[in-house]
Amino acid sequence: MLRHVIAHFRLQDWTAVAIELVVVVLGVFIGVQASNWNEQRETDQKAAVFSARLKADLREEAWSYEYEVGYFNEVLASAKDAADALSGKTPLSDEALLIATYRATQYRFNVRRRATYDELTSTGEIGLIRDQTLRDLAMRLYTAPMFDSIHKEGIENPYRKAFRMAIPYAVQDALQSACGDRLVPTGDYKAIAHSLDHPCLPGLSPSAMAASAAILRNDQHFLEFLRLRIADIETNLSNLTGTYKSTIREPLRRLAQEKL
């Protein structure tokens, strides 16, 4: 092409020179446009993949959120039953007391599904999520301090520590085996109910139950710690069902109900 242009210059064939230049410019333009179109196509494909991945993560988060609410309502019910028994308001048998006090120690750690979000934010590509509603929901959910607070309270609450320290290991093991959490398959909303609050028989001897129940009844600190535990759980549930209802819970529910 360059040789042709030089030859036309030498011959002063300006029409041919102009044609050659137009061909060159047009070729460059088409090449650039093709490159841009290809790059845009790859970006669109990447955006679609990340959007699908983020939606899948958030649908699991929606289920986990409801599991969190259902689970802590059952923990709260056990904590209140135990507190009423220890305060003398409502009598419970030794076995029922042990089950209620054990379940009041339980907490659920919400395993986050945030790999896609973390990848997008760490690489600065969160803009690939072009659905602003979806992007805003992810940002609100994954930056909310609520879940870390629930996890910290669950581990560090003094009632849980006091119970674990005072009740014999064999008794705790029997309670955990028979009366602990039931496995809830991820995404199974129906299995959330009674995942903790289910009929159980710990299989402990009357003497073992009586000895452990006496430890709980004879130490006023257990009732005090239970009252604090109840207050903390109620605060967590208030955040889950009230504070974050319109900004996180309801958008998650709508997303979960969309067709995959």
Image (cartoon, grey):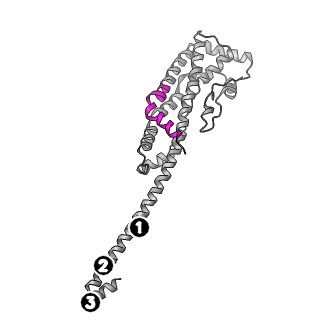
Residue assigned mark 2: 21
Q: Residue furthest top?
A: 88
* Camera-nearest residue between 59 and 164: 59
| Disc with the residue nearer the chain's start (1 vs 2) | 2
Q: CA distance from mark 1 to mark 3?
A: 34 Å
Amino acid at dot 1: Ala
Amino acid at dot 3: Arg
- Measured from the top left, where is residue 67 in percent x and y? 56, 32
Q: CA distance from mark 2 to mark 3?
A: 15 Å
- Measured from the top left, where is residue 111 in percent x and y? 55, 38
Assess disc 1: are there few (<14), some (14-19) or many (≥20) residues with their C-alpha within 10 Å of its C-alpha: few
Q: Are marks 1 and 3 in contact (CB under 8 Å)?
A: no
Judged from the image, the secondary structure of the residue bearing numbered disc 3 is helix
Q: Does 160 lie within the magenta span?
A: no
Assess disc 2: are there few (<14), some (14-19) or many (≥20) residues with their C-alpha within 10 Å of its C-alpha: some
Q: Are marks 2 and 3 in contact (CB under 8 Å)?
A: no
What residue lies at 75% left-to-right and 19% top-to-bottom? 205
Tell me which segment is drawn in magenta. Answer: 235-258
What residue lies at 63% left-to-right and 10% top-to-bottom? 91
Residue assigned mark 1: 34
Q: CA distance from mark 1 to mark 2?
A: 20 Å
Q: Is residue 124 left or right of residue 67?
A: left
The answer to whether 231 is drawn above or below residue 192 in the figure is above
Q: Are marks 1 and 2 in contact (CB under 8 Å)?
A: no
What residue lies at 47% left-to-right and 34% top-to-bottom? 250
* Quadrant assignment, res 100: top right
The answer to whether 33 is drawn above or below residue 124 in the figure is below
